[in-house]
Image: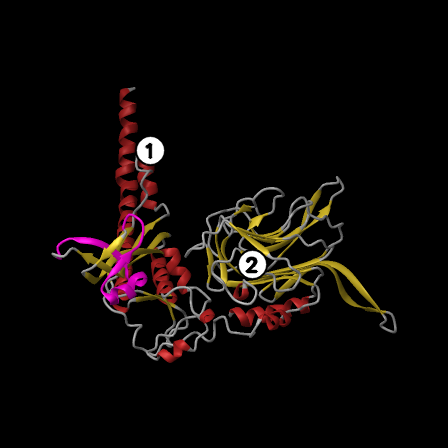
Amino acid sequence: MEGILQKVVSIIVAVVIFFILPIYVAYEKRDDISYALALKMTTDFVENVKSKGYISSDMYADYIQKLAVTDNSYDIYLEHTAKKYNPVIYSYTDDLKTIRGKFDYNLYKNQYKNGQITIDSGSNAGTYNNLILAYDLSEKVYTQDQILATIGTNQNALADVNNLEYYRSLDYRSLPSTSNLYKLDSQSNNIYTMNQGDEFNVIIKNKNVTMASVIFNLVTFGAGSQNTTKVYVNYGGTIKAETYRNRNVNDDTANNNEKTTANTSELVNSYITDGLVALLDGEYNSGTIHSNNTEVWQDLSGAGNNAVLDGFDFNDESGWIFNGLQFTGKESISIPNIDSEEYTIEIVAKIDDTKDSNVVPLLSNINSGGLGLEYVPLNSISESSEEKGKVRFRVSYLTDTGLSDTQKVVNNNVISYNKITSISGSFGKIAIGDMGEDDAATMFTTAMLLGVNGSVNGIDFLEQYVKPATGTSFVSGGTAIVGASPVTNFVGTIYSIRIYNRALTEEEINENYKIDQKKYGIK
């Protein structure tokens, strides 16, 4: 018995040494090569960024494409640490050795010119002399999401020119929401800029399990299963130059929010007006002007269906950004429900990448009935594969059991993250042709149409429409619930919302889209 056991052990050892070990060594060598390649590619990318002082989408895409040759999938983290120099005024004691107080220069610059700062009340009340102007150095960290959102945006790109008259002639609404947004004349995309002295860092690590790890875990019975990282690169440095300056840099006239209207009345009349009962536009969110602080989005249609904002922080991440309303997943806006048997709901929005696998409500009044536009994430678990990454339009109907269900139409196109998209859902009676010799009668059908950036598809609706529960509001960014806050999870930006109390035809949907296309630079 003991001899048999020795033979079995010998065979296992021989198999490991002569078969499994050479295979493991070969795959381990392959991981070493992948690491060397990834290190070289990351180093080249970072050095390129450091020498130029900016990142373009082409530079980033080229880096990702090169990494693909290693046959690994990676988690990639970009980080920009910006140096911020804030002017401050220091007040010293008479011997100039001790600091009595520090003041924001922008608030007290007039007093600084007079050589004295006076505080009338509070614990710091008094007169401060011996003023010296200096700078506070602080740092602000920008993450990968912020960097990629900047180079992928459809917002205006700011010209980098020395002519101040150019900036004086600009409408404030044509300025970008971030100072890092420029466009070089030789580039077809925006660039994310950094200043000399800033820090830029890239971290990558493989997220797949390599064959070497599989074999090692097999032989060791999972002893190393907790760590499957074979490629880990952390490389960065200091920005050395700002090559985007002092060059022929022009604003992006081909892909910006080109003005199509001079005032709110022209804006309203540029769209289909028949049946329009709500028009929310970020450019004129306060009625005749744009405000970054308003918590009520004014309806420009004249019907008085203003939207109420809820959950916004009104900072750089949550609130009014440029001419849009930015959501982080916790905010929503509510519009009074419009009582109708037919609807068209339209929204212009930018959907950001999200790890939430739940369906994202864009604009709906679905609550035991109703209808709505929704986005199905690529990582959705519960929805069909044919719907993932796409927008769908749902309309409620009455089932044989007396309960409501929804009929849906799904657009054929996968939505690109961080791209402005115009979406329309039309439900109701739509004329499909004439009948009779004298063409006096028109034939109608009840249908659902879904348009995404001018691509319209639809289906017949042969059921009994069910209205939403009494008290339900139209909600954007969340799912409507009577008597409670909406369930929210939308991450992105909303630029415009339109609601009609009738069904728009395919031609009318496309007519509205053409206005959106020009206004928001949709391609």
Q: Is residue 385 magenta?
A: no
Q: Is residue 97 magenta?
A: yes
Q: Residue furthest toward the top?
A: 1
Q: Which residues are magenta?
A: 96-124
Quarter of the image where the N terminus is located? top left
Label 2 belongs to which residue?
Answer: 297
| For the residues bearing labels 2 and 1, Cβ distance under 8 angstroms | no
Q: Residue furthest toward the right?
A: 437
119 w.r.t. 21: above or below: below
Residue 370 appears in the figure:
yes
Residue at the (68%, 66%) spot, across then down: 506
**Mark positioned earlier in the residue sequence (2 or 1):** 1
3 w.r.t. 48: above or below: above
Looking at the rendered structure, the secondary structure element under dot 2 is strand
- Going by the numbered disc 2, the residue's amino acid type is Trp
Depth check: 489 or 62 in front?
A: 489
Label 1 belongs to which residue?
Answer: 221
- Going by the numbered disc 1, the residue's amino acid type is Phe
413 w.r.t. 397: above or below: below
| Residue 411 percent across, percent down from the top left | 60, 59
Depth check: 38 or 444 in front?
A: 444
The answer to whether residue 462 is left or right of residue 327 is: right
Q: What distance separates the C-alpha of mark 2 from that of mark 1?
A: 61 Å
Looking at the rendered structure, the secondary structure element under dot 1 is loop
